[in-house]
Amino acid sequence: MRVLGIESSCDETAAAVVDDSGRVLSDVVHSQVKLHARYGGIIPELASRDHLRNIEPVITEALARASTTVAQLDGIAVTHRPGLVGALLVGVQAAKGLAWGAGKPLVGVDHLVGHLLAVFLQREKTLIETPRFPFVCLLASGGHTALYRVGSPKLDDITELGATRDDAAGEAFDKVGKLLDLGYPGGPKIDRLAKTGNADRHAFTVPMAAKRSLEFSFSGIKTQVASHIDRHGKPGSEGELADLCASFQRAVVTSLTRKLFAAAAEENVNDVVIGGGVAANRELRETVLLEARKRGLRAFLPDLASCTDNAAMIAYAGLRAIERGETHSWDLAATSRTALARSTRKGRGAR
Ligand code: KG4
Ligand code: ZN
């Protein structure tokens, strides 16, 4: 089986072709980061227009790189939730047009399910080992941070165990990046700077560390960094900047890791997985591997290209749905909310 995936939920226009072993036959990502950089965040209307400009060339390139035509596909998968509705619509309409024209099955994929299953993508020649269901997955991205028990690739078998009460982890990285004039997105830059910094230099408190619950909170740590800057000014040297980044990152990673392993213990699973843009973070990856080894658990980390937004994860989730016969009709709609039920009642804000 071969499925084309299309992703346009936020600021990446992406298309990819994946087969039923999870092999990524092509993976094209057009990032809008430069377009939005000067505004310090994503401008929805600019995102939609840029998706419109790029969707067709991105899809054409993905098919060409996979040496596949639409006629050879077994279906077309598209992110239809959650995200910016105007942005999602561009991908959804493109997918409908292609599927209708070629008489292929259409399947709408929840972006979060894409992230949860991204660990199954195979990007190397030799197949790598993948987790066994059920597993616990920490999904940490720019818009969402939550823990899930993943019983199978089916939406109904995915349960949220706890989520952030306020900001997402990636959002905290981006806000702190902005405070430190690092530009958008801050995550990769903080990650790089933290490598040479001293994480013990500043005692930022770990959000909700004392709580037994599996909920997170990240807005407080951003405030701690902001008040540090208010009191002491912005870092005066590269060394000071690195120390601040390292201390902030340590607090976030500690919180994410603690809750991931608390969830694994509570759910009594053997396999833990991470996903989403923040799963590309070097310290998070190292800590998860280390802590898993200590506990005799197996940790699975997606390739870096599978962590940040991409269409291969959408194609894969769609392929598994098509295999189960779960396709959508032509009235598939784009919506800003995830289909995954919330378990965290307290708090509002980005999920
Ligand atoms: O999954 P993603 O590409 O988009 C969403 O669905 O949100 O995640 C983007 C987020 C951004 O907040 C970005 O700063 C963060 O992931 N990110 C990182 C790293 N790479 C990307 N955060 C920490 N360390 C990284 N290496
Ligand atoms: Zn994402």
Image (spheres, rainbow, N blue to C red):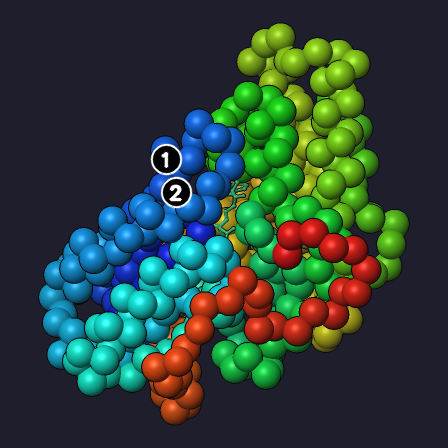
Q: Residue furthest top?
A: 236
Q: Position of residue 278 (x, y in %)?
A: 55, 47
Q: Position of residue 128 (x, y in %)?
A: 38, 66
Q: CA distance from mark 2 to mark 1?
A: 8 Å
Q: Amino acid at mark 2?
A: Leu
293 on left or right of 200? left
Q: Secondary structure at mark 1?
A: helix
- Give the SS element for disc 2: helix
Taking the spot 53% from the left edge, 43% from the top edge, the residue there is 281
Q: Quadrant of residue 351?
A: bottom right
Quarter-wise, where is residue 133 in the image?
Answer: bottom right
Residue 86 — which label? none
Closest to the observer, 240 or 125: 240
Q: Residue at x 75, y 16 (%)?
A: 230
Q: Are marks 2 and 1 in contact (CB under 8 Å)?
A: yes
- Disc with the residue nearer the chain's start (2 vs 1): 1
Residue 23 placement, left or right of 261: left
Say the numbered circle drawn on residue 35: 1
Mark 2 crowdedness (10 Å alpha carbons): few <14, some 14-19, many ≥20: some
The answer to whether residue 349 is above or below residue 137 is above
The front one of 127 and 149 is 149
Q: Quadrant of the N terminus?
A: bottom left
Residue 174 visible here: yes
Indicate the position of residue 262 as horizontal and vertical percent values.
Answer: 76, 62
- The image shows a total of numbered marks equal to 2
Name the residue that disc number 2 marks. Answer: 46
Vertical placement of 130 versus 100: above or below? above
